[in-house]
Amino acid sequence: MHYYQYCPHCGAKAFVFHGAEHFSCSSCGHELFLNSAAAVVAIIRNDKGEIMLAKRARNPWKGTLDLPGGFVDPGENFEKAMKREIKEELNRELVDMKYLTSTFNTYPYSGRDVYTTDAVFECQLDNIENISPCDDVASIHWMRPEEVDISIIPSESMRRIIAFLAKKM
C-alpha cells in the first residue's frame, strides 16, 4: 500500500512508505502515520428480538445492508456522534445507549482504504415505528441476527458484529 508519492509538507517526490502505516519524507524529514478513524455503530432492537439493518443509499456498497451509524466528527465523543447519526439517518432521538463492544474495519472511500475502529452500542430510540430513513439510508429492515446471511454484508466489521449478536441470542 502506497497512498502518497509526494510529501504533504514540502511537496517533494520523496515520500517513502516504511510499513506499519508509516511514511516519511527523505527531503524534509516530515513523518506521517495512517491512524484509525473512530466510528459508531447502533444496535437497535424491536420487541421481537430483531435488529435494525439499514440499506445503504450511497457508495461504497450502495444497496447493501449495514447497521446504522457512521464516523465520529472532530470534536465529538461517541455519545454525541451516535445521537447525531441517529438523527441524520433515522430522524429519531436517541433515548439511551450502552456500550457493547468494539471492532475494526477497512472502509473503501475515494479509491483509498480508511481504517476505522468501530464502537458498538445497544441503542434505544424515542420511537421505532414508521421510521422514514434519510441521509445515507435508503430503507430499514428488521431481522433476527441469526437469520442474517452475513455473506451478503460487505463490511467485515458489520459481519463480525452480526455474528457476535447471533451467538449471544
Image (cartoon, helix red, strand yellow):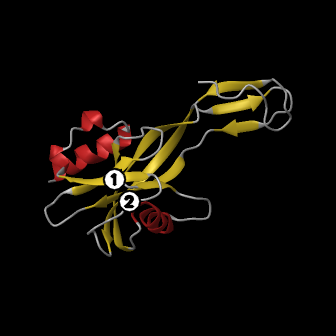
- The crowd level at tag 2 (other Cα within 10 Å; few <14, some 14-19, many 20+) is many
Identify the amino acid type marked 2: Pro
Q: Where is residue 68 in the image (x, y as percent from the top left)?
A: 38, 55
Crowding at mark 1 (Cα within 10 Å: few <14, some 14-19, many 20+): some
Residue visible at 27% across and 68% down in the picture: 128
Which numbered disc flags the more N-terminal residue, 2 or 1? 2
> Label 1, on which residue?
139
Report the side of 164 relative to 10 (left or right).
left
The mark found on residue 69 in the picture is none
Where disc 2 sits, the SS reads loop
What's under tag 1, amino acid-wise?
Ser
The image shows residue 81 at horizontal and vertical percentages of 49, 63
Q: Which of 5 and 18 is in front in this view?
A: 5
**Left or right for 142, reference 6:** left
Q: In this view, does 12 lie above or below 75?
A: above
Residue at x-position 74% and y-position 37%: 31
Q: Which residue in the structure is indicated by mark 2? A: 133
Q: In which quarter of the image is the N terminus?
A: top right
Is disc 1 placed on a helix, strand or loop? Answer: strand
Residue 126: horizontal and vertical position, in percent? 32, 76
Report, in whole angstroms, how far the alpha carbon at label 2 lies from the one at label 1. 6 Å
Question: Are the residues tagged 2 and 1 within 8 Å (C-beta)?
Answer: yes
